[in-house]
Amino acid sequence: MNEALLKWLELKHLNREGWVRASIPNVESVASHSWSMSLLAMAFCPSDLNIEKILKMCIVHDLAEVVVGDLTPDDDVNNKAELEHQAFKNIAPQFLSLFEEYEAGVTREAQFVKHMDKLDMALQSRKYEKEYNVDLSRFRESAGKVLKDTIYERLYNEF
């Protein structure tokens, strides 16, 4: 268990690859992203959803990345699901069911977490644009496809 705990902590030092490839200096870590999603979830969670499950899902949804890396749509992601599933089985089997629920996206909680994931990406892209004077609209366009026709689209459109 101690080895697994140390492995999990590597998420704090794993940079978000999309921002790295966009040449953003001092990018957020994957753990920072998970924290931000959790904060957004606390702010916007509908009262009829299970907030405890949602927060857990926000925190662990990218945990496999300490093994497989932060793969982006620009990478060969044909076997991403398989790689991440195996990584969870190896380093965090106690969280595997949360990860599987998130990936399947069939529960309202999982769908909400996916929305917070994309909302966070859209907000972060806007922050980096202002800070570094770069065009990161492709990140918001990607987020917009997921947020379209949801109650979170309004928040997305404000940015």
Image: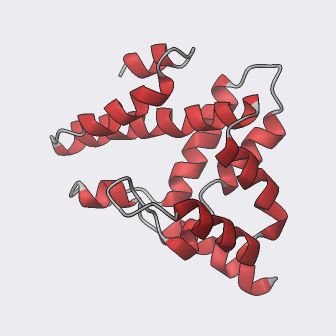
On screen, residue 114 above or below 99: above
Q: Is residue 117 left or right of residue 138?
A: right
Q: Quadrant of residue 129?
A: top left
Q: Quadrant of the C terminus?
A: top left
Q: x, y percentage for residue 127?
A: 32, 38
Image-based side of 94 in relation to 91, left or right: right
Q: Answer yes or no: is residue 25 visible.
A: no
Quarter where residue 37 is shown: top right
On the image, the x and y values in percent for residue 50 come to 83, 32
Above or below, 65 against 149 in this view is below
Measuring 76% from the left and 33% from the top, which residue is drawn there?
107
**Residue 115 as seen in the image, left or right of residue 70:** right
Q: Position of residue 47 (x, y in %)?
A: 80, 19
Q: Which of the colour schemes (rainbow, by chain, secondary structure, one colour) is used?
A: secondary structure
Residue 89 visible within the image: yes
| Point 65% across, 48% down: residue | 103
Who's the residue at 32% across and 31% down the image?
Answer: 141
> Which residue occupies the foreground of this view, 83 or 26?
83
Q: Residue furthest bottom?
A: 3
Please say if 40 is above or below 53. above
